[in-house]
Amino acid sequence: MKNKMFLIFQLIFVLVAVLTATVVIAEDSQAEKDSPASKGYVNEKIEELLETLESGGIINVAPSAPSDLSKYKYVPVHVGVGQKLIGDEGTEVILRVGRSFAVVTGAESLIDVTSGAELKDKAEISKNHIVIVPRNDGRGVRVVEDAWFLVKGGYTIGNVE
């Protein structure tokens, strides 16, 4: 009786293994048949589309030169005491360490996106707040305590006058 039960379990196990292998093989062969194009073909068509759109002036593809990385991602920037970081239009600045104040020309302001506030000249910059320079007109931050920033966009560092 025990030998008969053991034989039945072995037979069931073998049947399940064969069915599983058959299903896996069938799915693999179906996936190959469903593939409409190779990766190379798709990449080639995407490149052609981008070239067409660029040449027509419809879009501008961002340059991928390493020197331009700060325009597209945050980079850590150290600014010493007595220096200022002046941002280009659209530059985002996040104070991580140290102390700094807004540098604003005229009646304009910087934009503290995190709090929704406008930062007038000499307003203290809060740590970990995203501050945006809206125009390329000399706005930025003045450092009074050795500081580290995360900066996305163009900027220059100079001495406070």
Image (cartoon, helix red, strand yellow):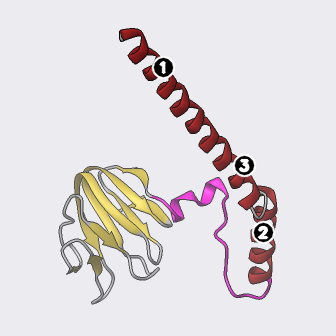
Q: Position of residue 109 (x, y in %)?
A: 28, 83
Q: Which residue: 74% across, 82% down?
A: 53
Q: Is residue 21 above or below residue 82?
A: above
Q: Position of residue 136 (x, y in %)?
A: 47, 80
140 in the magenta segment: no
Q: Which residue: 53% across, 65% down?
A: 71
Q: Which residue: 67% across, 57% down?
A: 65
Mark 1, secondary structure of its residue: helix
Amino acid on which the number 1 mark rests in the picture:
Gln
Mark 2, secondary structure of its residue: helix
- Frontmost of labels 3 and 2 is 3
The disc, 3 or 2, on the residue closer to the chain's N-terminal end is 3
Query: In the figure, residue 141 lies in which quadrant?
Result: bottom left
| Secondary structure, magenta segment, majority class | loop
Give the total number of marks visible in the rendering: 3
Give the magenta-colored segment's residue range: 55-73
Residue 52's disc is: none
Q: Quadrant of the C terminus?
A: bottom left
- Frontmost of labels 1 and 2 is 1
Dot 1 and dot 2 residues touching (CB under 8 Å): no
The residue carrying pointer 3 sits among few (fewer than 14), some (14 to 19) or many (20 or more) residues within 10 Å by Cα, namely few
Residue 10's disc is: 1
| Residue at mark 3 to residue at mark 2: CA–CA distance | 30 Å
Left or right of residue 18: residue 118: left
Residue 47's disc is: 2
| Residue at mark 3 to residue at mark 1: CA–CA distance | 29 Å
The disc, 3 or 1, on the residue closer to the chain's N-terminal end is 1
Q: Which residue: 36% across, 11% down?
A: 1
Q: Position of residue 150 (x, y in %)?
A: 37, 56
Residue at which label 3 appears: 29
